[in-house]
Image (tube, rainbow, N blue to C red):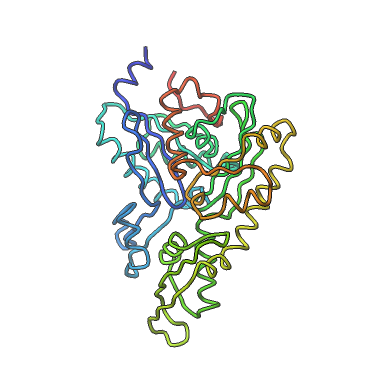
Amino acid sequence: MFKKFYKMFSNDIGIDLGTANTLVYLKGHGIVINEPSVVVVNQKTGQIVAVGAEAKQMLGRTPGHVRAVRPIVDGVISDFEVTEEMLAYLIGKAEKMSKKFIRPRVLVGVPTGITNVEIRAVEDAAKSAGAREVHIVEEPMAGAVGIALPVKEPIGSVVIDIGGGTTDVAVISLSGVVRSKNLKIAGDRLNTDIINYMKDEFKLLIGEKTAENVKIAIGSVVPGEYMEAEVRGRDLVTGLPREVIVTDTDIREAIMPSILTLVDGVREVLETTPPELLSDSMHRGLVLIGGGAMLRGLDELLHSVIKIPIYVAEDPLTAVARGTGVILEHFDDYKEVLVKTTHDVSPR
């Protein structure tokens, strides 16, 4: 009775709360928001100036009293109040597309291995932002559901979710994560590698946004076709603006130490995986999801090291958000994949 009532008068919203981007799924509408996880705050007034795409445009361009904040660091909340404001903005924006009388039920994706305290912070932020009911799912699990892997079967599925702040390697079977490892090597680390390389090799200071643009334009981890890009920054010797040409070889050299650490992390998880599940993955392969899965040649490099087929999921950036949608559409069927929390917020 109550369930039907809630379905009619309340929205179901899935949120992939990422370090770099936050995606929002609205039941019945699909993915309705994909915005950077950035909030700009006026420190004089405490007011939020901008959220999402608009805020990202302001990164590195704000006056002293206006601060651009990334409230999610390494996949977990680092600034509770700003996260709450960001979630309120995103939930409000999604709710405008389908007006309902009762506050929404929200499903949030989090990295594997986060603590109960960090999970509680996500729940509290979502509730403060307007959620009636909050559920938590691990991102690799949501991603596996989103790309239609048989997560409820006694079959081993291996998912590598490479996001902005963290990489999650997870072995999934029977609606649970059997083995997992959370690595702090992901998109943001590669951007930092590029910034440091430009400083050391070219004596050029560049910003985070420039580093990311170069990584997307010519980044690769195996030699392929020749690519180059113009990079503008500040000359560390003269202090004046300067432009240099960098090649795919330069970027590969910059990011390779981090990439090899990531590959070692994947190997560590496989080394501790039960043999039966490992034989499944040898047959079925590993699947890459998340924005980092689009880095050229990463699947080739992983295959050359661990000798197991590697597949890049279709539209890997939205896999987790799509998974939250599938779970919300078939909530009773997927209850077992949710993280069991210390307090239950579901209405009976």
Q: Indicate whether 229 appears above or below 295.
A: below
Residue 304, position as x, y percentages in the image: 66, 51
Residue 5, position as x, y percentages in the image: 32, 17
Residue 48, can we see it? no
Residue 54, position as x, y percentages in the image: 30, 56
Q: Hey, which quadrant is residue 348 in on the image?
A: top left
Q: How many marks?
A: 0
| Quadrant (top left, top right, bottom left, bottom right) of the N terminus | top left
Taking 93 as reference, is 305 left or right?
right
Q: Residue furthest top?
A: 1
Q: Residue at x 40, y 81 (%)?
A: 242
Query: Between residues 179 and 341, which one lies in front from this camera angle?
Result: 179
Query: Between residues 232 and 115, which one lies in front from this camera angle?
Result: 232
Residue 141, position as x, y percentages in the image: 54, 35
Q: Hey, which quadrant is residue 189 in on the image?
A: bottom right
Residue 50, can we see it? yes
Q: Residue furthest front?
A: 225
Q: Residue at x 43, y 56 (%)?
A: 70
Q: Residue at x 39, y 43 (%)?
A: 23
Taking 18 as reference, is 181 left or right?
right
Q: Indicate whether 196 appears above or below 48.
A: below
Q: Residue at x 37, y 67 (%)?
A: 60
